[in-house]
Amino acid sequence: MAGMRLLPEDSDVTQLRPPAAADLISDDDRSVAADSWSIKSEYGSTLDDEQRHADATEALNYRAEYSSDKDEQDGEAVSSMLGFQSYWDSAYADELANFREHGHAGEVWFGGNVMEIVASWAKGLCMDICQGHLPNHAADANSEPVVQREKDLSGWSVLDIGTGNGLLLQELAKQGFSDLTGTDYSEGAVDLAQSLADRDGFTNVKFLVDDILDTKLDKRFQLVMDKGTLDAIGLHPDGPIKRIMYWDSVSRLVAPGGLLVITSCNSTKDELVEEVDTLNQRRNAACQQPGAVGDREASVDSPPFRYLDHVRTYPTFSFGGSVGSRVATVAFLRN
């Protein structure tokens, strides 16, 4: 689950909006796809299905209370076959077969240039944080460096969510990271990523089958990368609920003081920041409810994430009097 294809260079559309699933798949295919991405992962669930869905629905209702008029279209979220696990299982089965027959690495989602930019930019952020250099808007006297003054990146633990063919982790390895883990809910993607890493000599990268919406990981990572996974989750018919489940899950995977770096072609920088603000508001409201125990890590004074920075070097274009980019990469600091 690695993201969506970029639009052609001469496109006038600012964000990728794939056609609706109803236009792309039959009723039978839709039924199979719906079964393949249920609230309960095929790898098992630690919570009752109905309870997890109820919790997410309650959070979604909470978010609606904070939505402005411009958010009314969220109720009619665009869905696509790219939101179903069955699509990715099929896609990576084809790419794995192609690799075994021809040695091809497969599709590079967002393009190789974006992947290189994300890896080098993330490295720069990590080095700045190690040296205590935070942007003024994110500086906090109580903030701790992610790694205790590490001068290199070998001590950083890195997780790539929805790793796909794992090429982003290879780029991060080239930047000096060595504790690298990639997860994907498609077993074919994990097989392909592992095969490519073995072929290319990246023996320090490991890959696991895991669903971010129902993760079995019990480790926290100092750098968590997401290149297109949140996009794909949002394209499921239950996208709004699943995005809330995503944020609840990912907030438990990023170590305190760590970084979450999201690359998206379906959300702008401001939209991602707004989504995190909603998460923080929801956590704070839950803690303030009478008799609520709340998340041990959540408090009114310490929301899960703070906006840190975003990539400013992507090519931009003008449309309808507005200037935008086809891709947004945003970093959030875990409190």
Image: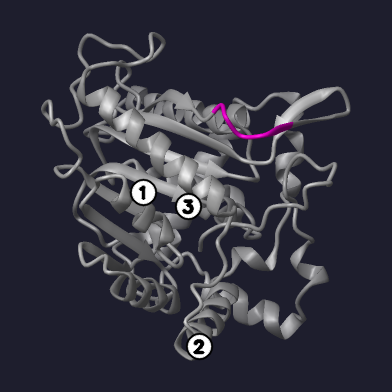
- Which residue bears the numbered disc 2? 97
Q: Earlier in the sequence, mark 3 or mark 2?
A: 3
Label 3: element kind? helix
Residue 303, compared with residue 175, is above or below; it is above
Label 3 vs label 2: CA separation?
40 Å
In the figure, is residue 107 to the left or right of 41?
A: right
Q: Secondary structure at mark 2?
A: helix
Are dots 1 and 3 in contact, CB under 8 Å? no
Q: Residues within 10 Å of mark 1 (few under 14, many from 20)?
A: some
Q: Distance of mark 1 from mark 3, alpha carbons? A: 15 Å
**Discs 1/3, front:** 1
Q: Which residue is mark 3?
A: 54
Q: Secondary structure at mark 1?
A: helix
Q: Main secondary structure of the magenta part?
A: loop
The residue that label 1 is drawn on is: 249
The part of the chain drawn in magenta is 312-316
